[in-house]
Image: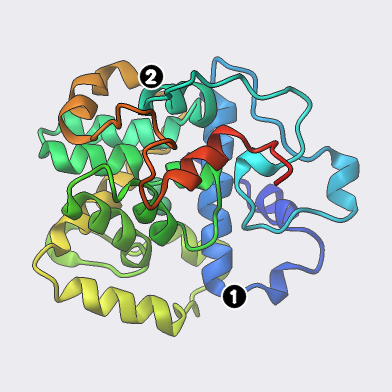
């Protein structure tokens, strides 16, 4: 997918770019690409975003999840015992980016654990964008194999580090958008070094590899292809996601009810 540099920079706001760390800018670029992708291919109405008037005035912090941006439509009600599929349908849709990355993993015969990791790797962006690898892992940790949440956590720092052996190059787009002097923050580098030396390294690396194929405006994808894999690899609580008292139940409840005042 082509990214219009000027349009992207405009989303960040006048005067903001110089104040952002390189890490912030790289994050912002990825989120911008996902939003543009959804707009380009979604059969659904685009997710509400700030109006032009709002963009010139005060704005929500950039780390705000999509569900917390200004919107005109009310949220679709969730069923009493929501499943992961309900969340995909009513809160994450159209979710083209994660569906495309999981579809690529499926079509290229990758392990089901990689496919489920790809399917879930960025869904937390609906809740919060800051440090999304860590939040994303925490969200699904009670429901998936430890290696799946591990892969989701470390895909975020690994994005910034090439690995010639598996054909993962540093994203050219980061050079074009931000210049070539980008240096990840120390905590990112630390996390990268830890993951690089870990025996599960490839689990997370595969998520970054499949990420590369997940910005195609012509791809046609659907959650239907993953219903069985979700059944095998995502422990669905019988009480419904958000109501099983798991360590991340509150996160699911927040995604279900972004409008609650307290
Ligand atoms: Fe990501
Ligand atoms: Fe991604």
User: Which color scheme did the rendering employ for the protein?
Assistant: rainbow
Q: Determine the residue positioned at 29% across, 74% down.
A: 192
- Helix, strand or loop under label 2: loop
Q: Determine the residue positioned at 52% across, 59% down.
A: 27
Say above or below: 182 vs 137: below
> Which residue is label 2 attached to?
220
Location of residue 105 in the rendering, given as x and y in whole percent from the top left corner: 20, 36
> Which residue is label 1 attached to?
21
Ligand 2 closer than 8 Å to label 2 CB: no
Q: In the shown orientation, is residue 226 left or right of residue 137?
A: left
CA separation in Å, label 2 and label 1: 35 Å
Tally the numbered discs: 2
Say above or below: 142 vs 41: below
Location of residue 158 in the rendering, given as x and y in whole percent from the top left corner: 31, 65
Location of residue 250 in the rendering, given as x and y in whole percent from the top left corner: 49, 46
Circle 2 Cα neighbour tier, 10 Å, few/some/many (<14 / 14–19 / ≥20):
few
Q: Which numbered tag is attached to residue 155?
A: none
Q: Quadrant of residue 69?
A: top right
Location of residue 24 in the rendering, given as x and y in whole percent from the top left corner: 57, 67
Circle 1 Cα neighbour tier, 10 Å, few/some/many (<14 / 14–19 / ≥20):
some
Q: Determine the residue positioned at 56% across, 42% down.
A: 254
Is 4 or 236 nearer to us in this picture? Answer: 236
- Helix, strand or loop under label 1: loop
Say above or below: 43 vs 11: above
Among the two numbered marks 2 and 1 on one chain, the one whose residue lies closer to the N terminus: 1
Q: Determine the residue positioned at 45% across, 28% down.
A: 87
Say above or below: 170 vs 116: below
Q: In the shown orientation, is residue 258 left or right of residue 148?
A: right
Say if mark 2 contacts mark 1, CB within 8 Å: no
């Amino acid at each position: 997918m082509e990214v219009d540099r000027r349009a992207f920079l405009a989303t960040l706001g006048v005067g903001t770019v110089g104040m952002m760390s390189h890490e912030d800018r790289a994050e912002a670029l990825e989120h911008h690409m996902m939003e543009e992708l959804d707009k380009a291919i979604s059969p659904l109405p685009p997710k509400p975003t700030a109006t032009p008037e709002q963009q010139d005035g005060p704005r929500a912090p950039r780390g705000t999840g999509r569900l917390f941006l200004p919107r005109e439509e009310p949220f679709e009600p969730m069923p009493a015992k929501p499943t992961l599929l309900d969340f995909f349908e009513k809160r994450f849709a159209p979710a083209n980016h994660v569906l495309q990355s999981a579809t690529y993993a499926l079509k290229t015969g990758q392990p089901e654990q990689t496919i489920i990791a790809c399917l879930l790797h960025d869904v937390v962006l609906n809740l919060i964008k800051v440090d999304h690898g860590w939040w994303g892992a925490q969200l699904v940790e009670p429901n998936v194999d430890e290696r799946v949440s591990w892969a989701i956590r470390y895909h975020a720092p690994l994005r910034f580090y090439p690995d010639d052996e598996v054909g993962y190059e540093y994203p050219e787009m980061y050079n074009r958008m931000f210049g070539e002097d980008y240096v990840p923050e120390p905590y990112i580098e630390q996390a990268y070094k830890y993951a690089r030396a870990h025996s599960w390294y490839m689990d997370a690396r595969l998520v970054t590899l499949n990420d590369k194929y997940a910005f195609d405006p012509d791809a046609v994808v659907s959650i239907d292809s993953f219903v069985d894999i979700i059944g095998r690899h995502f422990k669905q609580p019988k009480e419904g996601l958000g109501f099983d008292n798991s360590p991340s139940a509150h996160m699911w409840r927040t995604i279900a009810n972004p409008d609650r005042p307290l």
